[in-house]
Amino acid sequence: MKNRDIIVVGLQPWDIEIGSNCKNIAMELSGSNRILYVNRALDRISSIRNKNDKKVQQRLRSIKGEISDLEEVQKNLWVLNPRVILESVNKLPAFLFNYFNRLNNRRLASAISDAAARLGFENPILFIDNDFFRAYHLPEMLDVSASIYYIRDYLVEQPYFEKHGPAMEQGLMKKVTMVAANSAYLAKYASKYNPHSLDIGQGCDFSLFQKTSYPLPADLASIPSPRIGYVGALISSRLDIALLESVAEKCPDWSIVLVGPEDEAFRNSRLHHMSNVYFPGSKKPEQLPDYIAGFDVCINPQLVNKLTTGNYPRKIDEYLALGKPVVATFTEFMRSFQDYVYLSRDADEFIDVVKLALAEDPAADWKEKRMEFALSHTWENSVKRLSQAFEQLEPVNA
């Protein structure tokens, strides 16, 4: 795609602290296209419950006309804070949900159309980031030449979306021009509803992983080796607490280091009562490479369920970008990493492959191979695959 006008409807807001997939794709596309990035519209419950949140206050100021709703954040890229409040409808029965969700879509479409007109957009392409509620009707409510649904997570497996999500996502995939996925597993799922579904891979931002040295953090230096480490959100719906407890119990000489914010299940787990398990807490993104560099083995102990089996764990690329040996739970997606990552199917095998990783020959060329593989997963390459596939579609070329 070149010299096109593109409307990007983001599931995550532009000002999220850690860059989202959609934001990175928008930035990459803006190199040769004009982009209108639509921030997630404010919903009524959030406007009341979180009225003191700075982001909510900014949205409200935009709605009141106190600040501009449209901001040029870089060349060819504008961010829209829609001057609308959407009704909170997820808990409604289907017939009411469908009515009010259409109303929400109409409000959002009106705000987007107005902004696109002010920017002089012509025959824009609509790019929807995993938002099958707020964007369900946008392909027909907006005057667009084509539409793309981007699926990067199996959201319909999450409790919030289980009531209306499956029907909405499947319906949206049927109506868009094409579906782009960040894994072969999700592309296969999407192909049931749209024949123009493809895996465009995952891009990663490696700017924090290009340093000449990685100083060992003080709180990590006090932890004895070998350090078996994880960085990222500690969420029980995605990570296997029982596996971690078993590994820590059976291997008391290993230090299990878990860096990141915890959910309630992790906070209440036995892990906090095990002497060889350490929780350094949340760290700033720019600090994480130093922690990864200080691990002897990096791990991703995922639970295997519909939410995770096709998920692209970006942290694997971050581990490999530093050449670290990595041990991960086997999932359908991780097949594509099996030449660079040690995979396991249960706690005992997890322990066995960690031992193999710890025993690696430091003179071998594994580090360079891992780094080369990880660094091939750029946003440039991902967007290039998206653009090539899109331009080949008959509806676009007609």
Image (cartoon, rainbow, N blue to C red):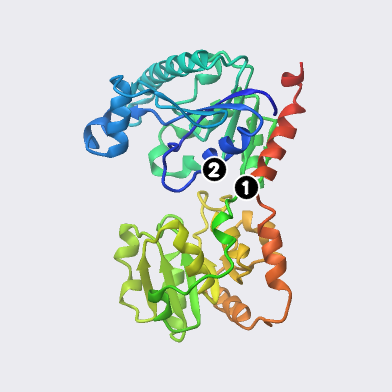
Image spot of residue 381 (x, y percent)? 69, 44
Mark 1 crowdedness (10 Å alpha carbons): few <14, some 14-19, many ≥20: many
Q: Which amino acid does label 2 sit on?
A: Asn
**Residue for badge 2:** 21
When the figure is inspected, residue 385 is found, relative to residue 242, above or below; the finding is above
In the image, taking residue 116 as reference, residue 372 lies left or right, namely: right
Split into 4 quadrants, where in the image is the N terminus?
top right
Q: Which amino acid does label 1 sit on?
A: Gln
Q: Are marks 2 and 1 in contact (CB under 8 Å)?
A: yes
Image spot of residue 22 (x, y percent)? 53, 38
Mark 2 crowdedness (10 Å alpha carbons): few <14, some 14-19, many ≥20: many
Along the line of sight, the residue nearer the viewer: 206 or 139? 206
When the figure is inspected, residue 341 is found, relative to residue 398, above or below; the finding is below
Q: At x 60% / y 70%, what residue is drawn? A: 324
**Residue for badge 1:** 202
Residue 51 marker: none
Image spot of residue 337 (x, y percent)? 67, 60
The quadrant holding residue 105 is: top left
